[in-house]
Amino acid sequence: MTSEECEQFLTCARIGRLGVTIQEGPYVVPVGFGYAGGKIFFHTCNRGLKMESLRRSSSVCFEVDEALSDATMYKSVVVFGTAEIIDDEKKMIPFLQKLIDKYRVPAAFEQYMSKPGRKREEELKSVRICLITPKRITGRKFVRD
């Protein structure tokens, strides 16, 4: 795939897979994510296996794919990069807004967080944004006639 095709796929794909290393070996987990400004981002809880591994090592792998069940078409993009954890509320909100726009009915962040059942301050304390800066991006595709 060309770099433009890789970027388009990263922009449109709905689910990606984050690969990190834990004590037992590789750990891969699906995440909803966004892609903007040449960087991948997703939100996650500030605790847990994923965060522990990201705090130990910033080297990550990220993958998106799509295929038809009859194997007449597939494509995948693999990103090798460096992860940064963002925990500053003011820096997180623009990323959270992009995720709301992608996965929910678009609404301003404050409007979305004021919905019944939302606990803005509590949620912002427990969430983090992970920002991946790519070092290398590869893409493959196959289409059978």
Image (tube, helix red, strand yellow):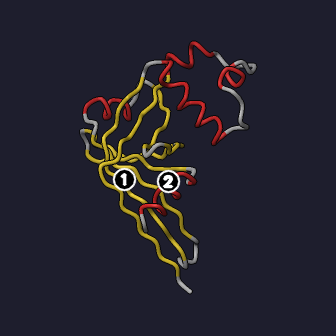
Is 144 left or right of 140, judged from the image as shown?
Answer: right
Q: Residue tagged by mark 1?
A: 79
Q: Residue at x 30, y 41 (%)?
A: 82
Q: Residue at x 32, y 51 (%)?
A: 80
Give the quarter of the figure containing the N terminus: bottom left
Check disc 1 and report its element: helix, strand or loop: strand
Query: Residue at the right extreme?
Result: 116
C-alpha distance separating marks 1 and 2 = 10 Å
- Position of 2 relative to 12 (above/below): below
- Position of 65 relative to 43 (above/below): below
Residue 124 point in image, percent of width and height: 54, 18
- Position of 19 relative to 46 (above/below): below
For marks 1 and 2, the one nearer the N-term is 2
Q: Residue at x 28, y 36 (%)?
A: 58
Residue 44 point in image, percent of width and height: 48, 31
- Position of 94 relative to 142 (above/below): above
Q: Quadrant of residue 120?
A: top right
